[in-house]
Image (cartoon, rainbow, N blue to C red):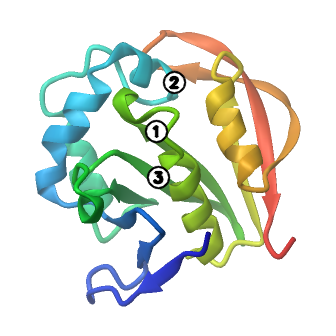
Amino acid sequence: MSATALAASDRDAAQPVIQTERLLLRPLRASDAGLIAHYTADRRVAEGTRAIPHPLPPGAAEAFVARAMSDDRDEDVWAIDGSARELGELLGVVSLTRIEDSQSELGFWVGAGFWNTGFASEAVAGLVGVNPHGSRTLFAEVFQDNPGSARVLTNCGFAYLGDAESWSVARNARVPTWTYLRRMGD
């Protein structure tokens, strides 16, 4: 599976549009807030992430989209768009956050109705293939009770690095994690 970076508008010059076989990874737009709120209202989706609260407070999805569209953002977020294949305009999101020089952290979630479809693996592989931050190393972590997300990472060339724990806002607790690393160019 190959991914292609397409020309981006001037505002999104640092965040390319990425085409995969079935998906388009594109910068978020204001109209995505409704589907983000819909999918993340599902406790299972929220509890699979560190930062999504459950229940989702009013305006949280709109605030997330506004941060993702901001010129001074610290995280690049792409909508996983399946509309070219007559699927939804937003199936989930995939993101990269710069954590140090030449290193980024990858994050992703998909709506529960799209689990076990390969969409998460395809989106992550597309983002890794284009490597828009020019990172030499990508990191990612998943909660240990989410082996499906761990498979997404290993399917995309990430190697297990070790165990840790992270705070989950939705769970209001520290949760054991598996940490993964992907050296680019490997």
Residue at image x 18%, y 50%? Answer: 32
Q: Which residue is mark 1?
A: 109
Which residue is more in the foreground, 169 or 27? Answer: 27
Please say if 144 is above or below 178. above
Q: Where residue 5 appears, x then y in whole percent?
A: 47, 83
Quick check: can you spot residue 131?
no
Location of residue 159 with respect to 12 vertically, above or below:
above
Q: Is residue 10 left or right of residue 182?
A: left
Residue plotted at (36% across, 90% down): 7
Which mark sits nearer the N-terminus, 2 or 3?
A: 2
Q: Residues within 10 Å of mark 1 (few under 14, many from 20)?
A: many
Under tag 3, what secondary structure? strand
Residue 96 higher or lower than 64, as above or below: below
Which residue matches tag 2? 48
Q: Which residue is at 47% across, 52% downward?
A: 94
Q: Residue at x 17, y 44 (%)?
A: 33
Question: Mark 2: which amino acid?
Answer: Gly
Circle 1: element type: strand
Q: CA distance from mark 2 to mark 1?
A: 8 Å
Q: Residue 67: give its label.
A: none
Report the disc number at residue 94: 3
Q: Is residue 88 left or right of residue 72?
A: left
SS under mark 2: loop
Tell me the kind of residue under disc 1: Trp
